[in-house]
Amino acid sequence: MAGWTTFVRANDAAGVAGGDPDLVAAAAARAAGTSVPDSRRAVAGPLPLLLPPNPVHRFYRGGDGIDRLRGVAAGEGPGAPEDWVGSTTTSLGNDREGLALLADGRLLRDLIAADPIGYLGAEHVSRWGTNPGVLVKLLDAGERLAAHYHPGRAFARTQLGSPFGKTEAWIILSAEPGAHMHLGLREAIDRSLIERWVREQDSDQMLAALNVVPVVAGDVLFVPAGTIHTIGAGITLVELQEPTDMSVVLEWQRYKVTGGEETLNLGWDRVLDAAELGAGVPFRGPAPATETGASSRRLLPEAADPYFRAEHVAANGPDVTFAPGYSVLIALEGELSITCEGQAPLRLTAGQSALIPYGAGTTTLDGHGSGIRCLPPAADSGEGKW
Ligand SMILES: [Zn+2]
């Protein structure tokens, strides 16, 4: 509850507009990822924070899509295929990699642990504890990813000691002509067939059994745990997923994922129980809003609500208002400003991201541009199917 006891109301918006030194200093501190106690804060909880880049290297190559989004020349970025945006999740087998660092060197995970209700809200904390329940990534596939799948919650609970599986969703930011995913089986298969794939490592056979899903910028795909999939080369996307790093890599040989990591150290016999062997029908979501006015538009189906939620937001006129809630906002184009009552705005340019804590209260988005707002599971959404 730290942070909630220092509430002092001060509707000193004129101070912000006029460059009040205290508020300007506080805004600068937030832009640098630090928070400064401000005796005239109008909101009770923690304030929105800029999230510095958080590159994570993986077993596959990245491209220049994340650099392009950020306006960085090709080759001058960190060269990692993924950026874990506002992450409180570690990569598999590591105790630090993956965790988002703020500009002052503190871990976002620690900030949330010190003030879970301020960051996440009481309803979320009563269900999920100090875990935000969602991991957001920027991902740029410079090569096709291995055919793989992720365990669902029931399997993760009993076999891996995790309340979360890894259902995921993709919001496509850019795709080279002809770029495509493989997503879900075209027809149901017998277990003996997937056992043969694992043994023989015949990539052509595996891929031929999967739906080919061409993608363009603006497409949204929902990927329930268990669904066998690949991400094709030349695709940059925002990925929302449950906060784990658990992948079962069917094409382990070609991508050199070995030593037990390919099966999450469970062995094939056990881990194949988590694969969906029925035919999969890919969910394809709505394209982002194209209206010129301010808008905020849901991107994922209701079936995704127990896992995460996402909105396309556009600011080109009247302000967009967000109800109090933990969210990660990624700016895609233009310049976005996030304001909570009595505070100078936090500005984002394309490729920059902010964490908006629950305790920041009602926040307003303005500026000229668009972004993706990523939210945790809906508190009232029930258990989820996967
Ligand atoms: Zn995946």
Image (tube, rainbow, N blue to C red):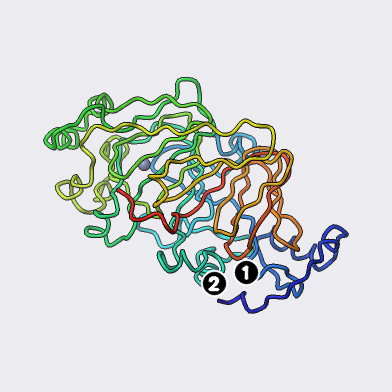
Image position of 208 (left or right of 63)? left
Counting every numbered tag in the picture gives: 2
Residue 367 occupies quadrant: top right
Q: Residues within 10 Å of mark 2 (few under 14, many from 20)?
A: some
Secondary element under disc 1, as helix, strand or loop, is: loop
Q: Quadrant of ligand 1?
A: top left
Image position of 8 (left or right of 232)? right
**Which amino acid is tagged 1?**
Gly
Q: Residue furthest right?
A: 18
Q: Where residue 45 is drawn, which disc sits there? A: 1
Q: Where residue 115 is drawn, which disc sits there? A: 2
214 up-or-down from 254: above or below? above
User: In the image, residue 87 lies at what x, y percent?
Assistant: 49, 56
143 up-or-down from 155: above or below? above
Secondary element under disc 2, as helix, strand or loop, is: loop
Looking at the image, is mark 2 or mark 1 nearer the viewer?
1
The answer to which of 41 and 106 lies nearer the viewer is 41
**Which amino acid is tagged 2?**
Asp
Q: Residues within 10 Å of mark 1 (few under 14, many from 20)?
A: many
Label 2 CB-ligand 1 distance < 8 A: no
Q: Residue at x 20, y 48 (%)?
A: 271
Q: Residue at x 36, y 47 (%)?
A: 167
Q: Residue furthest bottom?
A: 5
Q: Where residue 25 is drawn, which disc sits there? A: none
Residue 281 occupies quadrant: top left
Q: Are marks 2 and 1 in contact (CB under 8 Å)?
A: yes
Q: Residue at x 61, y 37 (%)?
A: 69
Residue 342 occupies quadrant: bottom right
Q: Earlier in the sequence, mark 2 or mark 1?
A: 1
